[in-house]
């Protein structure tokens, strides 16, 4: 059978590329915010270049199928990202999902453990915030506020275990605020020895240094 290069490309290459696109649909779904802007134009460029060399064009049926595939990808919900309440709720839910993970010094890996700043840094980084890794540096992050104006999701900054030494040594995220006071979620090296929710009580009030808002 005497087939031209263009005929071979049209018969075999285009269906193959389309099948690859379909196979990576889930991958694109997860990464659409970045990959949709990069991969799809590259694929169109490769298809166009290949078709140009073969002195042919991409069959209309495959152009249409690829367009439908791209159109079916989820759109970024910008309004949700800008909704402070939903963002705070998502952040707290994510932090809560790590309750019980053990405390481990100088670690920010949920599979291994967290220290206090490793936990806070891991939570905020998951939502795209650039935050420091050490508890001391959190003092210079975000906007300082007061306990009276603090809100859920703000970061509480404390001294180390010895409140008489007024040096930053611990951080946690405000988990809830109600008539009973403030609760915060943190990776504790104390009795819980892991991620836990704690009352902002006398002990921690004595250790309190400042509160900053990052959200």
Image (cartoon, rainbow, N blue to C red):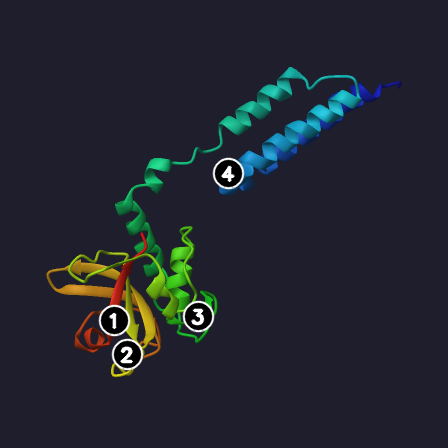
Marks 4 and 2 in Cβ contact (< 8 Å):
no
Q: In front here: 206 or 38? A: 206
At which x and y percent is residue 165?
Answer: 29, 82
Q: Earlier in the sequence, mark 2 or mark 1?
A: 2
| In-image side of 20 versus 75 (left or right) | right
Mark 1 — residue? 209
What residue would you read off at disc 3?
113
Alpha carbons under labels 4 and 1: distance apart: 41 Å
Whether residue 38 appears in this view of the structure is yes
Observer able to see residue 11? no
Q: Which residue is mark 2?
A: 166
Give neighbour class at mark 2: few <14, some 14-19, many 20+ (Cα, 10 Å).
Answer: few
Nearest to the observer: residue 196 or residue 201: 201
Helix, strand or loop under label 3:
strand
Query: Sequence-wise, which precedes: disc 3 or disc 2?
Result: 3
Image quarter for residue 161? bottom left
Q: Residues within 10 Å of mark 4 (few under 14, many from 20)?
A: some
> Which of labels 1 and 3 is toward the front?
1
Mark 4 — residue?
A: 32
Q: Position of residue 86 (x, y in %)?
A: 29, 45
Q: For the point 45% across and 33% down, which residue is it?
A: 74
Nearer the N terminus, badge 4 or badge 2?
4
- Determine the secondary structure under disc 1: strand
């Amino acid at each position: 059978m005497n087939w031209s290069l263009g005929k071979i490309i049209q018969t075999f290459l285009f269906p193959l590329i389309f099948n690859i696109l379909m196979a990576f649909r889930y991958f694109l779904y997860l990464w659409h915010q970045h990959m949709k802007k990069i991969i799809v134009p590259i694929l169109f460029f490769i298809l166009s270049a290949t078709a140009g060399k073969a002195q042919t064009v991409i069959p209309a049926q495959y152009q249409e199928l690829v367009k439908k595939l791209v159109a079916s990808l989820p759109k970024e919900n910008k309004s949700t990202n800008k909704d402070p309440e939903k963002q705070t709720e998502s952040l707290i839910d994510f932090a809560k999902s790590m309750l019980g993970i053990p405390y481990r010094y100088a670690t920010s890996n949920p599979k291994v453990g967290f220290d206090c700043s490793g936990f806070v840094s891991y939570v905020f980084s998951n939502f795209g915030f650039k935050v420091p890794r050490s508890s001391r540096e959190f003092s210079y992050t975000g906007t300082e506020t007061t306990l009276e104006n603090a809100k859920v999701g703000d970061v509480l900054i404390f001294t180390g275990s010895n409140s008489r030494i007024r040096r930053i040594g611990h951080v946690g995220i405000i988990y809830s605020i109600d008539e009973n006071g403030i609760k915060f979620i943190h990776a504790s090296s104390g009795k819980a020895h892991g991620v836990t929710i704690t009352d902002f009580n006398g002990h921690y009030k004595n250790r309190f240094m400042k509160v900053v808002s990052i959200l």
